[in-house]
């Protein structure tokens, strides 16, 4: 898969089949994306990134990669894991993936319902 930020300053390519297509409803993802953030993940060595990503540290557990030009929220990676999550909305074209779960649902906004029948993890 190939992906990019809204302005095209950052591009990325994945190799292999991503895992864990999910929607995160945590407060940080909601604030960064404006709603909820859908992503999938791969080992970091299977995601090639071109462009200058700005890594934002909002907690001591993980960092988020954004485009410094347009502000697109593209990546998430935990400090103690060797995987990287990438925004499904940033993929150029169809992903071929299906969501498998919702995470941090206890933090979801009160203005929407999760009604797709997928597992929900609080």
Image: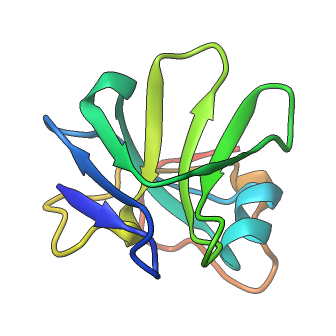
Residue 121 vertical position relative to residue 105 in the rendered view, above or below: above
Task: State which quarter of the image contains the N terminus.
Answer: bottom left
Q: Is residue 21 visible?
A: no
The furthest residue to the top: 80
Task: State which quarter of the image contains the C terminus.
Answer: top right
What residue is drawn where x is 44% and y is 55%?
A: 51
Pick the front one: 71 or 33: 71
Q: Is residue 48 left or right of residue 56?
A: left
Can you give x and y, in whole percent of width and height, for residue 73 in the image?
59, 63
The furthest residue to the right: 59
What residue is drawn where x is 68% and y is 60%?
A: 25
Can you give x and y, in whole percent of width and height, for residue 91 in the image?
29, 67
Pick the front one: 11 or 28: 11
What residue is drawn where x is 15% and y is 37%?
A: 15
What residue is drawn where x is 36% and y is 67%?
A: 4
Q: How is the image coloured?
A: rainbow
Q: Is residue 82 left or right of residue 91?
A: right
Give the image quarter of residue 89: bottom left
Q: Is residue 94 visible?
A: yes
Can you give x and y, in whole percent of width and height, for residue 64 in the image?
66, 47
Q: Is residue 63 left or right of residue 117?
A: right
The furthest residue to the bottom: 111
Residue 95 vertical position relative to residue 41 in the rendered view, above or below: below
Q: Is residue 86 left or right of residue 114?
A: left
Give the image quarter of residue 9: bottom left
Residue 110 vertical position relative to residue 98 in the rendered view, above or below: below
Can you give x and y, in whole percent of width and height, for residue 105 in the image?
69, 55
Residue 66 vertical position relative to residue 81 in the rendered view, above or below: below
């Amino acid at each position: 898969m190939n992906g990019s930020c809204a302005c095209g300053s950052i591009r990325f390519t994945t190799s292999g089949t991503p895992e864990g297509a999910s929607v995160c409803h945590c407060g940080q993802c909601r604030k960064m994306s404006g709603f909820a953030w859908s992503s999938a993940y791969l080992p970091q060595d299977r995601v090639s990134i071109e462009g200058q990503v700005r890594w934002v540290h909002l907690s001591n557990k993980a960092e988020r990669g954004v485009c410094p030009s347009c502000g697109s929220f593209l990546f998430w990676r935990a400090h103690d894991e060797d995987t990287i999550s990438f925004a499904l909305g940033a993929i150029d074209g169809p992903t071929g993936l299906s969501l498998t779960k919702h995470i941090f649902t206890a933090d979801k906004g009160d203005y929407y319902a999760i009604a797709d029948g997928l597992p929900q993890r609080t």
